[in-house]
Amino acid sequence: MCKNVFMTALLEHRQNHGVTRTWLAGQLGVSRTSLWRYELGKSKPPRSLLFHAAHLLRLPPDELYDE
């Protein structure tokens, strides 16, 4: 299941790495609006997107996903 802290973790890590929402959304193949909705917890991202986001932000996958 997706951690409740995913939204906060993704936003914080993205900002800490100096990564824009536009860049990360492009790398993930989603719209900026979709990424924004994931960060705010309005939508649940697919598992594959969580792993890809973790890789791009150089995080262990369990920072964003917990089975």
Image: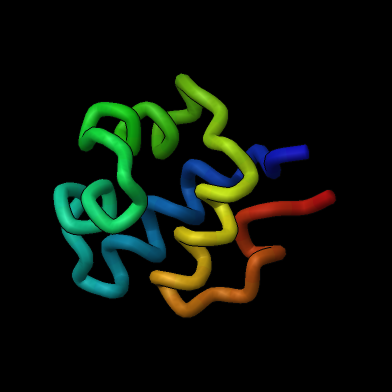
Residue found at the far top of this picture: 42
In this picture, is 10 found above or below 7?
Answer: below
Residue 4's x, y, as percent? 65, 38
Q: Residue furthest right?
A: 67
Lateral position of residue 3 relative to residue 67, left or right: left
Q: From the image, which quarter does the N terminus lie in?
A: top right
Q: Is residue 44 above or below residue 4?
A: above
Q: Residue 16's image quarter? A: bottom left
- Work out whether residue 58 or residue 7 is closer to the camera in this orientation and state it: 58
Residue at (37, 27) in percent of width and height: 37
Rendered location of residue 53, percent (x, y): 46, 59
The answer to whether 21 appears left or right of 48 in the picture is: left
Position of residue 42 measured from the top left corner of the image (x, y, whole percent): 46, 20
Number of residue marks: 0
The residue lying at 49 percent from left, 28 percent from top is 41
Q: How is the image coloured?
A: rainbow
Residue at point 69% right, 43% down?
A: 3
| Residue 32 shown left or right of residue 4 in the figure | left
Residue closest to the far front: 29
Of residues 20 and 12, which is closer to you in this image?
A: 20
Estimate the x, y position of residue 21 in percent, counting from the top left: 21, 49
Residue at horizontal 31%, vertical 45%? 29
